[in-house]
Amino acid sequence: MADSARLVIFCGKGGVGKTTLSLAAGLKHAMNGRRVLIVSSHPLAELALAVSLEGLSTRFPAAAPNLFVLYIDPRDLISDVVAEHFPAPAMAQRILNSSIMTNLIEIAPGLKEFFFLGRLQELSERRKSKSAAAPPDYDYLIWDAPATGHFLTTLRSAKNFEVFLTGPLAAAGAQLRRFFSNSQNIQLIPVTPLEDMAIAETLEMAQSMAKDFGVNCSAVLVNCASAMCSATEADIAGLGPMTGAAPAMRFAVERGLMERERCVELRAALPAPQVLIPRITQSSNDLDLLVRIGERMDFSFA
Amino acid sequence: MKIIVCVGTGGVGKTSVAASIALTQARAGAKCLVLTTDPSLRLRTALGLKDGLLEQRVPVPDAKGELWAALLDVNATLDEAVRLYAKPGNQARILEHPIYRSIAGSLSGMQELMAVERIDQLILRGFDNIVVDTAPSRHALDVFDKPELFANFSDSGRVRFVSRTYQFAESVGLTAIGRGALEFSSRVESILGTTMVRQMLDFYSLFYPIAEGYSARARRTVGLLRDASVTEFRIVTIPAKALRDAQFFIEALNKRKFAIGMICVNRTWHHALPEVTPEGLAAELLDSYRSVSASHRSAIARLRETFGARVKEIRILNELERDVDGVESLRRLADQLEPSLSAAAS
């Protein structure tokens, strides 16, 4: 039996669809009876604006009780840490209200990120029963990670604390670094459209994760892929010349051909299975959209 | 002098739009610089951008003015601030301090802080116009709050007291007593551990004079950004995000009393459709194009309806077939951004 929920990390450049794909993957597994917690580092209000899970309990009554979405505010984490150390609420409040405390913590490099990692680990190991034989509360913990730069900064905070400090935070840093270096615990799934910058970031991230944490990507989700990416050479030859074609047609073909090249380059540079997700625009509501995207994610988190 | 600040979330092509805006101004005769945070490798190469503090002239043969580009190099800008504002004896201690190393290397808000510092440096160098490409996130507007956070930090009597007392105690060899007298810091220590608190106190007592100097400059720069006769904010977005980006940024900018000029809806699929319907793969590609294009059109219609009256202009930019990878593609974007098109856009 697993000691902890599998932590699945959807990472990538900003705006590539991490949140939407996280929700789609979460919904898919919840529909299959898995208990899924999606942890997001951006506020729920923004998440709700991206894609909404509204109407989940009426549309998918079986999935709804298995699917949880949690936004972690770093400020709350800090309040929790203070409360743990100072059980007397008045004292805890005095400390939280003090400008020195808030300023020190606000500017302490990596501290918020560090507490965030600690909470992720705790959530993945959490169980209702104290017995070690009890299963963890969740089968999958999906981390809808921040954009690449901040994502790497967050993970590196564990390492920095281990290296630069001594005392309790350094020990905690070493322990977190071990947790996030264990591929039994985590699964890294970058999301990228077939665009230069997003691909470059994906490759840098993959390299950095392999070097700093010894973790490799389990799959690459290629988002918004053109039909050209999976077309046969014969189909492409059948398109004929584009000179004189309408601008929309020329755009669709040229863009598709570029994406096809990028797909090949990406495969050569990053040898993880590629999952092509087409650009899906028309759905009567967000839940339908998520289900349709989920259908394309024919890979498991095993 | 004119400053244009482009704000927008990730993946909307903000850097390309910022560089194209700068190009339109160079064409009109200005000496214009685009300050960018995170260009693609191809665009970086095209603009000749290198790490460090140097501005780079981008050759544009047919422009009346000049196009310049600079990269916001957070580490170099911060090092420069230390060299400019720290006491000579403290410079090396700061630059080699472990807290400094991890701040310079990894603190996420530092990018925003240094953007403001760099704008100040560039104003002094005499550019007519500066186009700023902010960090690609909704939090990028913290750029303009964070200087004040830093200012509050150094204005706070207690921090000044802590830093100075510590500095004094240390200088006369009474570190333990000096720190012990700060009853408060010992409580913080029990949470964060002794090393971290000591390192932070040590660091901030060194860094404090820089923060003071920084705050004064940051207030001045933020003052310029609030001056509607100098600065215009442009919201860069894409059709799928247009409505919620507009809502978020209009609110956030209004709250901070910044003037909003234009919303640029970039990467729109708004090309002319063919008259005859093709077959096979072409039909599949065109179907997909049509459905994306239809959703773009309806998103833009909703945007105009909801926010048209609250901004000066909404400009639609067609997506290019390939990534923006050089001056030629910037030229094609800039063509769509020319002010003369304003009247035609409806």
Image (spheres, coloured by chain):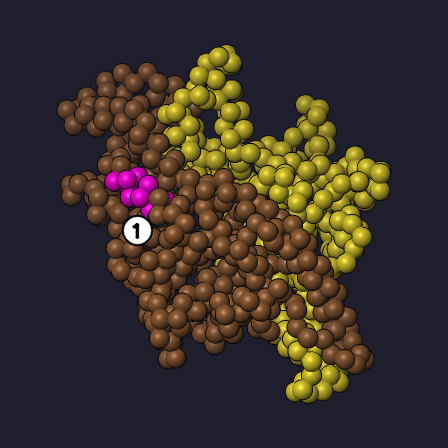
Q: Position of residue B95 (x, y in %)?
A: 26, 45
Q: Which is more toward the observer, B214 or A75? A: B214
Q: Position of residue B87 (x, y in %)?
A: 17, 41
* Residue drawn 74% across the image and 73% down it: B285
Helix, strand or loop at mark 1: helix
> Is B221 in the magenta?
yes
Outermost residue on the front side: it is B343
> Is A169 in the magenta?
no
Q: Which is more toward the observer, A301 or B301? A: B301
Q: Position of residue B107 (x, y in %)?
A: 41, 43
Main SS category, magenta section: helix
Say if A128 sits above or below A60 in the image. Answer: above
Three-letter code for the amino acid on which mark 1 is drawn: Asp
Q: Please say whether residue B28 is visible from this viewpoint.
A: yes
Q: Position of residue B32 (x, y in %)?
A: 35, 65
Q: Please say whether residue B41 is visible from this viewpoint.
A: no
Say if B288 sits above or below A169 in the image. Answer: below
Q: Which is more toward the observer, A249 or B126? A: B126
The image quadrant that residue A15 belongs to is: bottom right
Q: Assess disc 1: are there few (<14), some (14-19) or many (≥20) residues with their C-alpha within 10 Å of its C-alpha.
A: some
The image quadrant that residue A227 belongs to is: bottom right
Chain B: colour as depicted: brown
Q: Which quadrant does the C terminus of chain B fall into?
A: bottom right
* Residue drawn 68% across the image and 61% down it: B296
* Residue drawn 53% across the image and 36% down it: A116
* Residue drawn 40% across the image and 73% down it: B27
Q: Which quadrant does the N terminus of chain B fall into?
A: bottom left
Q: Which is more toward the observer, B8 or B298? A: B298
Residue wearing tag 1: B120
Chain A: colour as depicted: yellow
Say if B77 sits above or below A197 in the image. Answer: above
Q: Which residues are magenta?
A: B213-222
